Image (cartoon, helix red, strand yellow):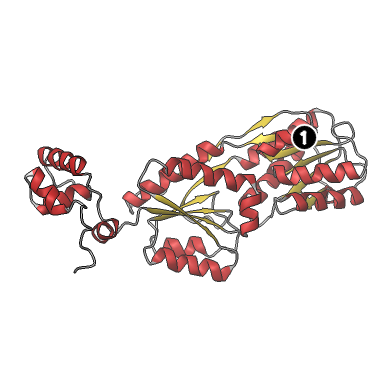
Amino acid sequence: MSSTAARPGTPTLDQVASLAGVSRATVSRVVNDSPRVSPTAREAVRAAVETLRYVPNRAARSLVTRRTDTVALVLSESGTQLFSDPFFASIVQGLSAHLADTDRTLVLLAARDRREQEKIGRYARQGHVDGVILLSLHSDDLLPGILASSRVPLVLSGRPLDGREVSYVDADNAGGAAAATRHLLAQGRTRIATITGPLDMVAGLDRYAGYRSALEAAGRTPDPDLVDGGDFGEVGGMRAMSRLLDRAPDLDAVFVASDPMAAGALQALRTAGRRVPDDVALVGFDDAPLAQACDPPLTTVAQPLGEMTALMLELLLRRIEDADAPVETRVCATHLVRRASA
């Protein structure tokens, strides 16, 4: 017996064709969304499919359409970072929700090093996924080049650092960081420090640039002693805050490039006996749920993750349907959310 034979009681393509009064080829074209079918025949086939409760063989369908109905979300970080950072969790939840009522499946892949980036590149090139969304890109990430050269439909979360022509969705990171810094300046703070994200990532670079631009616009010269770096994680923020206090004990405000790092900074300030906001005002970035759970709740910069997630998927599906579609980019506005920490 053929390996593709129907199970007993399972309706077949031939049965659908017989009930609809059309050829087997016509049924196949309707099932595979071909436009080369008359409206009358299409309706007859759809009625027969519903009556018989026919379910297409997805493996056979993929041979015809060359589609897997699978979208990959690739994170260039460790699995620990994926499940601990609320930014990544929000993106995963948003994509899953948007795909829930479709035939498409979301595959989550972590590329922790160059070997895994190359492996994921081969996986995508071999046709196992229809398209890829890349998150948390670092400057040495191989995947944008691998996928673009292989014409795998691709959308980035964040603009590419190398300026390559590729579709992406980003937040106005520099504008948000500048707004946060201006808010601290408006409160009369004079020694405003920052904890940056990784500076091999566009979000880290742009948020640092926004902090500097706001100080310079106010006639302030950025002080290197008031700058320290973290990894967007809570522990990294706590360590960076401790180093800042050692170098600049007179600091009276801090702009922190992510809410998890700001939560860590808050712990370090508390350990050092500094009151927030009385002694040190604190502003984060992301407006993650933990921002409201902190004591005091964090003033932070909100980015519209729901809108960004929907746009990334929209741009990717457009590229899947048309490989020659023009490159599209979107930059979403951010805004300051005022709470007790500043």
Please give the name of the residue rendered at 33% of the width and 54% of the height, measured from the top-left corner: 323
Please give the name of the residue rendered at 18% of the width and 40% of the height, measured from the top-left corner: 51
Secondary structure type for disc 1: loop
What's the amino acid at mark 1? Ala
Looking at the figure, which quarter contains the N terminus? Answer: bottom left
Q: Which residue is mark 1?
A: 218
Q: Position of residue 67 (x, y in %)?
A: 31, 56
Q: Residue most toward the bottom?
A: 115
Please give the name of the residue rendered at 65% of the width and 48% of the height, measured from the top-left corner: 85
Q: Residue 111, located in which quarter of the rendered image? A: bottom right
Q: Residue most toward the front?
A: 8
Above or below 333: residue 324: below
Q: Nearer the viewer, residue 142 or 19?
A: 19
Q: Residue most toward the left?
A: 21
Residue 112 visible, this angle: yes
Q: Is residue 94 left or right of residue 52?
A: right
Q: Nearer the viewer, residue 286 or 53?
A: 53
Q: Position of residue 247 (x, y in %)?
A: 90, 51
Q: How many marks?
A: 1
Q: Nearer the viewer, residue 197 or 35?
A: 35
Looking at the figure, which quarter contains the C terminus? Answer: top right
Q: Nearer the viewer, residue 81 or 329?
A: 81
Q: Is residue 328 left or right of residue 202?
A: left
Q: Position of residue 229 (x, y in %)?
A: 76, 53
Q: Position of residue 165 (x, y in %)?
A: 46, 54
Please give the name of the residue rendered at 58% of the width and 59% of the height, measured from the top-left corner: 76
Residue 257 visible, this angle: no
Callout 1: few (<14), some (14-19), or many (20+) C-alpha neighbours within 10 Å?
A: few
